[in-house]
Amino acid sequence: MEGSVEGLRARAPVHFWNFASRARVCAWTLWNAIDDPPDASVIGFRPSTAGALHHGWQRERSFALESIVKAAIAAQRQIAQDKRPPSKTHDVETLWGEAKLPKLNRDDKWRLRKTSQLMDWEGRYATPASLKKDRSQSLETLLPRHMNGWIVGSSPPFGWDEFDRLYQVAEQSFFHSQAQLSGGPLRDGLDKR
């Protein structure tokens, strides 16, 4: 598999970056459409269009974050001449550490765990391959608690600004590694597709 097209793609940094950047554009488009959704009744959709757009935003946001972190890992491994592809996991918090990205505060840990939970549920199937990966308890450990143990706060915000800040951290790591490989900045050349 190492020399196959699939093997090459599985460890190609730009392959992951392409998926991440396209998912980011979709996430941005959905985020901006939530407050003024189109009339989906014309296609027979009766539930909340804004709710459907929000669901799509969360899915694309999660896919973009996972993919950009994997792009950073693949780029770092390419520099190290390590032919292993990024781990086949949706655990974005673990991938973040594997990519040697900056330490996360409590809210950002919650955001990455939420991303992982969404990726578990939004992958190719309607339910995760294993329900052993239920991350809801892991998410709850990061929420504020009262002295008696009751959760007293709500989850941290996870809108466009929070998402894009995390995305930019991983993307900058990717571009830094790509520049090391090529001897100069690559962003302009990659953006023109």
Image (cartoon, helix red, strand yellow):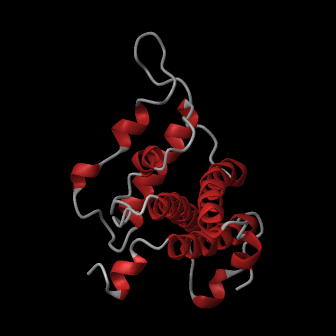
Residue at left offset 36%, top offset 59%:
120
Q: Is residue 67 left or right of residue 51?
A: left
The quadrant of the image that shows the C terminus is bottom right
The image quadrant of residue 183 is bottom right
Furthest residue in direction front, as rendered: 183
Residue 177 shows in this picture:
yes
Residue at left offset 50%, top offset 38%:
109
Q: Is residue 16 above or below residue 4?
A: above
Q: Is residue 91 above or below residue 19?
A: above
Residue 154 shows in this picture:
no
Q: Position of residue 80 (x, y in %)?
A: 44, 58
The image quadrant of residue 129 is bottom left
- Between residues 104 and 192, which one lies in front from this camera angle? 192
Residue at left offset 59%, top offset 71%:
23
Q: Is residue 104 left or right of residue 94?
A: right
Q: Is residue 125 left or right of residue 186?
A: left
Residue at left offset 59%, top offset 66%:
181
Q: Position of residue 89 (x, y in %)?
A: 34, 59
